[in-house]
Image: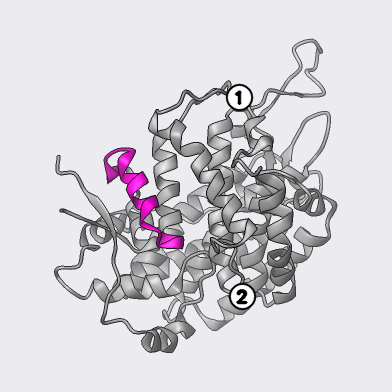
Amino acid sequence: MTRHHLAWFVSAAMTASIAFAQSNTLEVYSIDPFTLLRVKSSLQSTSSPFKPAYRKLLRDAEKAMDVDPVSVTEKDATPPSGDKRDYMSLSRYWWPDPSKPDGLPYIRRDGETNPEVKKYPDQELFGTVVSAVVPLSLAYFFSGDEMYARHATKLIRTWFLDDSKGMNPNLQYSQAVPGRSNGRGPGVLDGRHTALVIDAVGMLRGSRSWTAEDDTALRAWFSRYVTWLTESDNGKDESDSPNNHGTWYDVHVIPAALYSGRTEVARRLMQEAGAKRILSQIEPDGSQPKELARTRPFHYSVFNLEAHARLALQARRIGVDLWAPATPEGQRIRAAVDYLLPFARGEKAWPHDDLDGVQKSSMALLLVRIYALTQERKYLAEALALGDAKFIAHRDLLWYGVAPVVP
């Protein structure tokens, strides 16, 4: 198999003025809009290095066309509120206590998933929606084919906006623990993929299918959601979390706040992120103690850094640079990457008990995202050094403007 290399592709044909002129139909927060516009411009050429990834995207979009609309009301269980429109899930790392006849209260077995989570399908159903909406919206943005926008709109309307089946804007009953809680702060993590839906909607703007009425209704939904995230006990608990949950909380809330016009909420979180997330979570040597304490420490260290990378992209939308090399925050986050690299390369043995061990593919994908964020080529070189670049998802190649080219 031919080995692919990754290179940052910047189309000379796409100028900043054109990008600004088109920005009214491209409202995204977790992806750089200029990168998407450059990729779209490149695809007009038959020699575009993004063509292979684009063809794969279209195949994904065709499969997504077969995904039927699903609703949060399809579960058999009824939340304590009595309203099936309330999202509900079971905390995956909690199990029945074998020493108790009824198993209650459940006990924690970190890193081990209780199969009972499948009895509460809301998380899986929402994952189905996101997994279809993302390629459909991206395919529409690049191709202009209305059929992709039409089906993506149908999926979004059913999950969020349907009068009888649409999800209520809260996660009050997320990650429940039988015998302990009907829902917890950590359950807010279940909602992190709403950020992808907001970006998908941004790519649907300008289509005939996604109407002004749809957009107004969804912005109102997210405004109520932001209120719940910032004012409920569960939302406040997650905001105070000192590990990846706290970082993903910010990544989750900021685009929702920006999309719904709650700019003051987004700005406050961004202004707090340097001290509250980066400097408090990452030691000067780059270790992340809260993540290293888990039973899957390599996974969670990378998982948290992925959140920091997304947070940095979002921050740029309001003029905050969390990755500047000269700042304490930028130095600390780079130290976190450098801390993991020798273990990913196999130069050092991972010294922590780990159910999963070192995962080179996840580290390489993280490095590609950091390269796209910083344009520092050393991160690209490190990603390539970890193995064949074929494992990099084609969606990420298009999102981050990283094109596979044959040397």
Name the disc covering residue 318, or none: 2
Name the disc covering residue 112, or none: 1
61 lies left or right of 205: left
Vertical placement of 298 versus 397: above or below?
above
Question: Which secondary structure lies at badge 1?
Answer: loop
| Res 359 visible | no
Vertical placement of 49 versus 342: above or below?
below
Q: Amino acid at mark 1?
A: Glu
Residue at left offset 69%, top offset 39%: 77
Q: Earlier in the sequence, mark 2 or mark 1?
A: 1
Binning the other alpha carbons within 10 Å of mark 2 as few (below 14), some (14 to 19) or many (20 upward) gives some
Where residue 276 appears, as percent x and y from the top left, is 74, 54
Where residue 18 appears, as percent x and y from the top left, is 37, 87
Tell which of 366 and 143 is nearer to you. Answer: 366
Q: Main secondary structure of the magenta part?
A: helix
Quadrant showing the N terminus: top left
Residue at left offset 27%, top offset 75%: 11
Q: Which residues are magenta?
A: 372-390
Q: Amino acid at mark 2?
A: Ile
Count of numbered circles on the image: 2
Vertical placement of 316 versus 175: above or below?
below
